[in-house]
Image (cartoon, rainbow, N blue to C red):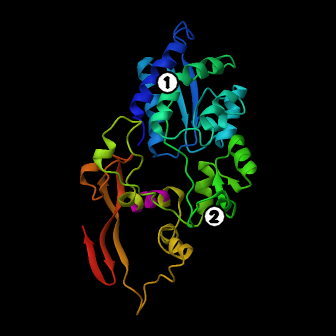
Amino acid sequence: MLRPRHAAVAVAVSALLALLSSAAGGGDTIVLRLATTAPEGSPWADACQQLTSGIEKASKGQVRMKLFRSGLLGEELETAQQLQAGTLDLYAGSSSSLVEALPELGVLEMPFLFADLAEVDRALVRVLPSLGKAVAQRGFRIVGSTDVGFRHVGSKTPVQSLTDLRRLRLRSQPAPLHARLWTLLGVKHHPLGLPSVARALEDGTIDAICSDHTPVDEDAKQLPFGESEAGATGLELLLALTLKWSEESRIALPKAIAKVTTEPARILGIGAVAIAAGANADLCIFDPHLRWKVEPSRLKSQGKNTPFAGYEVKGRVRYTLVGGHIVYEA
């Protein structure tokens, strides 16, 4: 479950206006540059857009914002370095990329430190004020914060020990602290930031896409943040979001669809998947042009929690056939 982004945005707007209240005089306009690696159209990029719009509105035009999404100004580490050099005013991203400039933030990235989200909340309430003071001494200000849950390792084979992990090659955050951790553990890792993930999908470095579908029922979600179960529904949005990526990246539709169909089947060793005489009629028939609004109450999944609630997307499954029999129809 994600912390409410609107609350984090409201706090950031108030904090920024407080910092800028005496910075401009005589009707001068302040121009601030905000960079993020969050892809355009993602909930986090939208939160940044809400922040910029909120600041401009609340300042009555005295502050004008320039927002750079999708890693336009570089990967997270490069963006953090620009912030340190003073060529960038605001940065929205993970704390891991700021550890080199602001070592105190490393405490938030320590592995295996917390047992659950309730411990995270209790610790942050006490730690953030001290971190804010330490960061301020280095010439920076924390104007808002939120989290996206725990980092986790996904694998097509079971990982039950460090030995199992050392047999794999994994993608890691492009952050020095993470690189040191995996190196010390003897794990082969490949640092890859969000913009690089998109490029790696395009050039074939990354073979497949999964939905990370983790449905959680309302009883487990409607609890205080620290007690609620982590997870979001993803399966019903996989097609529409894949088509969105295909269109924006100008990836041919067959290549994009292969990332969620034939490529995962190949990796899992399911065997050849083809539309041919004599082959299993396991098919998904969809309308790539049908537009629809993501309404949690209308999702079929047990879990209704999704960061894309309210979004208008394009592309929807009309029929699903398994073994030649229609098992789903919309």
Identify the residue at horizontal 64%, vertical 55% (top origin). Answer: 171
Q: Is residue 186 magenta?
A: no
As displayed, is residue 247 above or below residue 228? below
Q: x, y (%) of residue 72?
A: 61, 43
Q: Can you say whether 63 is above or below 185 in the image?
A: above
Q: Which numbered disc flags the more N-terminal residue, 2 or 1?
A: 1
* Residue ID at (33%, 43%): 221
Residue 50: which numbered mark, if any? none
Which residues make up the magenta segment?
A: 239-245
Residue placed most toward the observer, 196 or 251: 196
Q: Which residue type carries mark 1? A: Val
The answer to whether one can see residue 134 in this image is: yes
Residue 293 location, x and y as percent?
Answer: 30, 51
Query: Quick check: marks 2 and 1 in contact, CB under 8 Å?
Result: no
**Depth-wise, is mark 2 or mark 1 nearer the camera?**
1
Image quadrant containing the C terminus: bottom left
Which residue is tagged 2? 203
Residue 197 lies in what quarter of the image?
bottom right
Q: Please tell me whether residue 241 belongs to the stretch shown in magenta.
A: yes
**Main secondary-structure element of the magenta-colored stretch:** helix
Amino acid type of disc 2?
A: Asp
Q: Residue at x 51, y 82 (%)?
A: 271
Would residue 129 be found to the left or right of residue 190 on screen?
A: left
**Is residue 102 among the parts visible in the rendering?**
no
Give the tally of numbered discs: 2
In the rendered view of the protein, which quadrant contains the N terminus? top left
How far, Cα to Cα, is label 2 from label 1?
43 Å
Disc 1 packing (10 Å; few <14; some 14–19; many ≥20): few
**Residue 125: image tag:** 1
Label 2 element class: helix
Indicate the position of residue 222 as horizontal and vertical percent values: 30, 40
